[in-house]
C-alpha cells in the first residue's frame, strides 16, 4: 500500500487537483475523480469527495497496482458492427436509445460487445477520448440492464461541455422504474449517501461515509403491489436509483442485486425479466456549439421489451383507478 503524507505546501488544495499534480498529469482529472469515487484513494483510511480540501498530515492511501489496473485496463477497443438506435446525430454528439443487456464500455469481463465498440464502428473512429481510451465517446453511463436515452460525444469539446452540464444539473435526465410495493408518499426526495459495499464490489450501500446522493421521485401510476415511478437525479452515483429505492422498501422489479426477489410473491411476479425494470426515457441539454436547447423523450413503444411487457400486463390486470 502506497502512502502520501500531506505537508504544508499542499494544505487546502482540492483532493483531485493534488493527485493530478502528484502523478504529473499521467491521469486526467476525470480519471482521478473516477478512481476517488470508486475508493481507489482513501484519506486517513476513509473515503472522501474529490472536492475535499487537504489538511496538514492527512495520509492518502492507495494500492498502486490496483490503481494502474483500474485506470489503464489492458483493453484494445475494437469496432463492433451493431445497428444502433440513433435519435440524433451531428458532428459533435449522438443521442441514442441504448438496448438492455449492453455494457456502456469495456470491462475485464466484456471488451468486444459494448456501446463504445458499437460507437467506434458507427463513427469510423471519430469519438472523444476525454473519458479515457477504454470508454471512447461515453459521457455518462447506464447500467448494463438499464435501457434508454444516452448521450455520446464525437469530440472532446462536446464531451467536456456536456459533462459539465450533467455535473451542474443544467442537463436533465429522467427515468421510469416499476418499483415494488405501493408508496405511502406519492412524491418525495431520497437523500442518502452511497458507498461501494465492502462485501460485494458490484453493489452500493447506504453509508454516512459515502458520497452525497439525491433522488427525486414521483408515482405516476399504481397497481396492486407495484408502481410506475418517475425519477430525477440530482446526483449521478453508481446504481443510485436502484440502491435508493431498495433502501426505502421499494426495490425495482426484477432487481436481484437489491432484494427484489424477496418481495415477489404476487401472482404477476411470475413474469420473467432480465433483471431490473429501469428505463432512461428523457434527456434535455444545451447543444455545446450553439447553445440550442435539445430535448428527447422516448415513446413507450421504444422502451425495452421487458418494460413494455410488464407495464402492459400490470395496466390490464392490476391498475388502480381513482
Image (tube, helix red, strand yellow):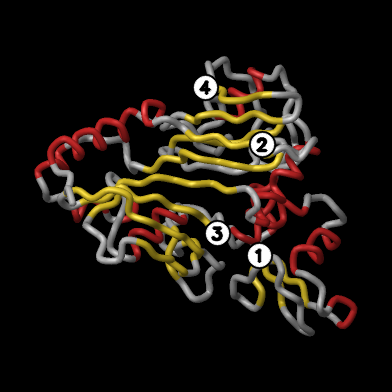
Residues at marks 3 and 1 touching, judged by CB atoms closer than 8 Å: no
User: Which disc is residue 308 wearing?
Assistant: none
Helix, strand or loop at mark 3: loop
Residue 104 in view here: no
Q: State the residue position of label 1.
A: 41
- Image x and y of residue 31, in percent: 71, 51
Q: Nearer the viewer, mark 3 or mark 1?
A: 3
Q: Nearer the viewer, residue 321 or 187?
A: 321
Q: State the residue position of label 4.
A: 85
- Image x and y of residue 175, in percent: 44, 46
User: Which disc is residue 134 wearing?
Assistant: 2
Q: In the current view of this chain or complex, which residue is farthest to the right?
A: 9
Q: Nearer the viewer, residue 79 or 297?
A: 297
Helix, strand or loop at mark 4: loop
Residue 55 figure quarter: bottom right
Query: Horizontal placement of 27 versus 203: left or right?
Result: right
- Image x and y of residue 102, in percent: 47, 31
Amino acid at each position: 500500500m502506497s502512502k502520501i503524507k500531506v505537508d504544508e505546501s499542499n494544505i487546502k488544495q482540492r483532493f483531485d487537483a493534488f493527485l493530478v499534480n502528484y502523478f504529473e498529469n499521467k491521469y486526467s482529472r476525470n480519471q482521478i475523480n473516477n478512481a476517488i469515487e470508486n475508493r481507489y484513494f482513501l484519506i486517513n483510511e476513509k473515503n472522501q469527495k474529490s472536492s475535499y480540501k487537504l489538511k496538514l498530515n492527512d495520509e492518502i492511501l492507495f494500492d498502486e497496482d490496483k490503481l494502474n489496473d483500474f485506470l489503464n485496463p489492458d483493453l484494445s477497443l475494437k469496432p463492433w458492427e451493431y445497428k444502433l438506435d440513433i435519435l440524433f446525430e451531428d458532428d459533435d454528439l449522438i443521442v441514442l436509445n441504448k438496448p438492455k443487456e449492453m455494457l456502456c464500455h469495456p470491462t475485464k469481463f466484456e471488451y468486444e460487445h459494448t456501446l463504445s465498440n458499437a460507437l467506434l464502428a458507427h463513427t469510423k473512429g471519430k469519438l472523444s477520448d476525454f473519458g479515457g481510451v477504454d470508454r471512447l465517446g461515453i459521457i455518462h453511463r447506464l447500467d448494463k440492464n438499464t435501457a434508454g436515452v444516452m448521450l455520446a460525444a464525437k469530440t472532446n469539446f462536446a464531451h467536456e461541455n456536456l459533462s459539465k452540464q450533467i455535473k451542474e444539473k443544467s442537463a436533465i435526465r429522467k427515468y421510469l422504474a416499476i418499483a415494488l410495493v405501493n408508496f405511502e408518499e406519492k412524491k418525495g426526495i431520497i437523500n442518502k449517501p452511497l458507498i461501494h459495499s465492502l462485501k460485494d464490489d458490484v453493489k452500493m450501500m447506504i453509508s454516512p461515509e459515502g458520497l452525497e446522493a439525491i433522488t427525486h421521485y414521483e408515482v405516476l401510476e399504481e397497481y396492486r403491489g407495484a408502481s410506475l415511478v418517475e425519477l430525477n437525479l440530482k446526483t449521478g452515483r453508481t446504481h443510485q436509483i436502484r440502491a435508493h429505492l431498495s433502501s426505502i422498501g421499494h426495490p425495482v422489479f426484477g432487481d436481484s442485486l437489491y432484494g427484489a426477489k424477496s418481495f415477489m410473491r404476487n401472482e404477476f411476479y411470475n413474469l420473467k425479466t432480465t433483471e431490473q425494470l429501469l428505463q432512461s426515457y428523457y434527456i434535455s441539454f444545451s447543444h455545446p456549439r450553439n447553445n440550442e436547447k435539445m430535448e428527447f423523450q422516448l415513446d413507450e413503444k421504444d422502451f425495452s421489451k421487458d418494460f413494455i411487457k410488464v407495464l402492459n400486463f400490470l395496466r390490464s390486470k392490476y391498475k388502480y383507478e381513482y
